Amino acid sequence: MCPKAGKIDQSSKSTAIVRSERPIALVGGGRIGPDDLNMTLINVSKVVAADGGAIPLMDSGRMPDAVIGDFDSLDSSYRERIPEDRLFPIREQDSTDFDKALRNVETPLVLGVGFLGGRLDHQLAVLNALVRLRDRPCLLLGEHEVVFHAPPGITLGLTPGDVVSLFPFQRVTGRSRGLEWSIDDLVLEPNGRVGTSNRALSEVELTVDGPGLLVMVPRAALDRVMQAFLSGKTGRWPAREE
């Protein structure tokens, strides 16, 4: 972790505020269910709060390893309790706190909680960042599902009958095995065909030809999705060129 608050060089994409060889939790200030933090914290080594996400985290008894954001949602009564060297303000207003935090962690996998539910515009901005920051694998835990940006290839040990929804944020093609309705030979795009409410018949394999596809599977599959990403077999998209 960087030694001093406010000393981050945002011009360098390789600069990370928090690094870990194990998964990192990212906590937001949105809706957090009663078991969300427990499901997340048992799987990670470090916890990063995106701005006001420090509040539910500290209320649970866990001090964040870092707080990243513009700090417009972090109450002073909480901020004063956080060690100064764990505060990393990023004042620009061109990105969300989720975006600011995700692009400043370096880890094999991020587990995000407190970013789904609540205001629809906030959720859409989070999903937009999930696709744009394609080189940073991240699983978002929702009330009913786990959401992630599809890597080049992934195999998921799902239960037959599990809902598997695919939603494209841009035009994408791919192939599948183990889905009731195959995506082979289909073009998925946000203003055309989408792939919501598909179902798993058995183990599911997905291969996509480019980035831009969001995958939603049942919340109960979190551990299996984590294993798929941490196996090192999924591949990884290169960073988007700005």
Image: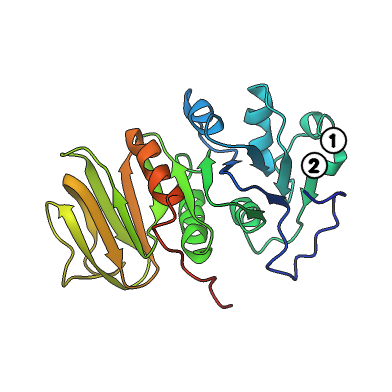
Q: Residues within 10 Å of mark 2 (few under 14, many from 20)?
A: many
In the rendered structure, are the residues bearing label 2 and label 1 in contact, judged by CB atoms less than 8 Å apart?
Answer: yes
Q: Amino acid at mark 2?
A: Arg
Is 105 on the left or on the right of 207, as rendered?
Answer: right
| Residue on which the image places disc 1 | 83
**Rendered-image quadrant of the C terminus:** bottom right
The x and y percentages for residue 118 are 47, 39
Please name the residue shown 24% across and 55% down the image.
Answer: 205
Q: Amino acid at mark 1?
A: Pro
Of 171 and 149, the residue lying toward us:
149
Check the image and report above or below for 214 versus 30: below
Q: Residues within 10 Å of mark 1 (few under 14, many from 20)?
A: few
Is 156 on the left or on the right of 18, as rendered?
Answer: left
| Residue on which the image places disc 2 | 86
The x and y percentages for residue 180 are 12, 51
Is 92 on the left or on the right of 83, as rendered?
Answer: left
The x and y percentages for residue 135 are 52, 64
Please name the residue shown 46% across and 62% down the image.
Answer: 131
